[in-house]
Amino acid sequence: MKFFKSVKFRLTVWYLIVMSILLFIFAAVSYFTLYRNLYDNLDDNLENRWIKLRGLLRESKDKVDIDMERELGEIILIYSPEGILQKSSGPFTDTSDIVPVVQEVAQGNPLFFNTTTTYDREIRFYAAPVTVEETSLVVLIGRHFDEIKIILGRLRTIFTLSGLAMLFLAGIGGLFLANRVLRPVDRITRTAQKIGESNLSHRIEIDSEDELGRLSLTLNRMIARLEDAFRRQQQFAADASHELRTPLSVIQAEATLALSKDRKIEDYRETLETISQEAAYMSSIIDKLLFLARSDTRQEQYSSEKVNLRELITDLAINIETLAQEKGLKLEVGTIENLVVRGDKDRLKQLLFNLLENAIKYTMVGKISISAVRKDKMAVVTIADTGIGIPPQDLPHIFERFWRVDKTRSRENGGTGLGLAIAQEIAEAHGGKIKVESELNKGSTFSVILPISPDISESSGKKKIKRKKKQLKNI
Ligand code: ADP
């Protein structure tokens, strides 16, 4: 059953169908060409013989010994208006069905016709009128054409048998070829199965540059992506549990210590404050993880409104300035062009807040500057600091979840290692991206690039509404 559903079987069937059609066309064309040629030859021959006989009749004034003149296998009949005048000897005796034909031919219409002899052999006649010495005669000359029928019959048998034999051989050949061509597919399937079952680091061997080679390459790339996603998933789960275990251990240790003996009220207060801080830290990690999980499964809902970046940055700058001043840092607001993007205002605020918060966290002295300008059709918001910078080897990873250059320092600052991952997630959800440049001990510059298309999106929004109205009318 499996075999009948296989590509091999289907390919062979298609191959046989095409082959049968071609063979049939070939046989039919050959057969009918030969058929026509044989009958045309017979007719030409009868006509030529008839012309010769007419000459003889005219020369000898109808006193021709037709038995002498007829060739082997020929039957000659000569009719006058009174009836049959001469008939060549031979077993052809019954002439009754010829009389109506003779009458028609006598009107001046020569013709070919077939008739059957009394001994059941088919005979083909050419009949035409001749005038000899003012007597109107009709001369018929005929020949059996059994040979033609036999030849055509044999040809039919040959075509049928050889056709069937060819189809049989083509079927076996087709199956063999399909098997050969598709063998690498079986190999690919087996390897892919093994990869799925055992380990994602295996790859399919590529030994050709054809379609199957390209299929293997595509599968290998897909497996590589899966492996990467799987590895990151595992890493993420390990990191997440580790991150949550640390504050939990602190809470547990603090509680156990506080309960081990009676303590002063201030000690209890201190313990509860630590527990509260750790719980808040855990809660912030869980919130961020939930956001990322929702983004991964496309469950996070982003609103789509017009967001004026100048207003958003001005609002943020007021909050951030206090944070910066607490650390003795200066917040410099550079050129802020009047830019409008389409998106979720709160999320965009969170994105910029994360970057500004990091800039303050990782800058000890100096300033933090922010600017927003238009470049082509993009809004570019730049947040630069004069902080500790990021080592070049860490730069490609800083947007990964839980990646921190200095775990302890980040933890002390309340960092979770998720801020940049969230910022990137938000930027990408708005069709944008974040670029970073950094030099160790000199500072870092983060650029958020977002598409600005308020007019286009506005008009496309109107178009959408128009389309919807149209659709509603059509219902
Ligand atoms: P965290 O909560 O630890 O700040 P983030 O995802 O926001 O996590 O940042 C990841 C890491 O990237 C940080 O731990 C820090 O090492 C580095 N980083 C981010 N922003 C800056 C910056 N402005 N200056 C220096 N290092 C930074």
Image (cartoon, rainbow, N blue to C red):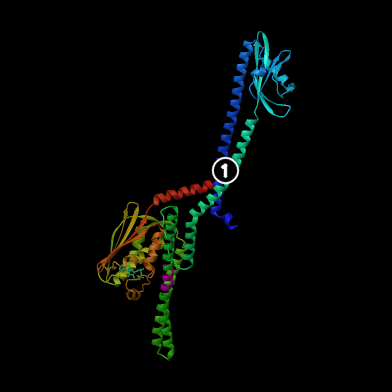
Q: Does residue 34 appear to the left or right of 100 in the view shown?
A: left
| In front of the other: 83 or 459 | 83
Mark 1: which amino acid? Answer: Ser
Q: Quadrant of residue 281?
A: bottom left
Q: Is mark 1 within 8 Å of ligand 1?
A: no
Name the residue that disc number 1 marks: 20
Q: Quadrant of the N terminus?
A: bottom right
Say above or below: 46 vs 448.
Answer: above
Q: Quadrant of residue 241?
A: bottom left
Q: Position of residue 274 (x, y in %)?
A: 39, 81
Residue that appears at 49% across and 56% down: 183
| In front of the other: 19 or 385 | 19
Element marked by disc 1: helix
The magenta-colored residue range is 232-239
Specify whether residue 45 is painted magenta.
no
| In front of the other: 57 or 172 | 57
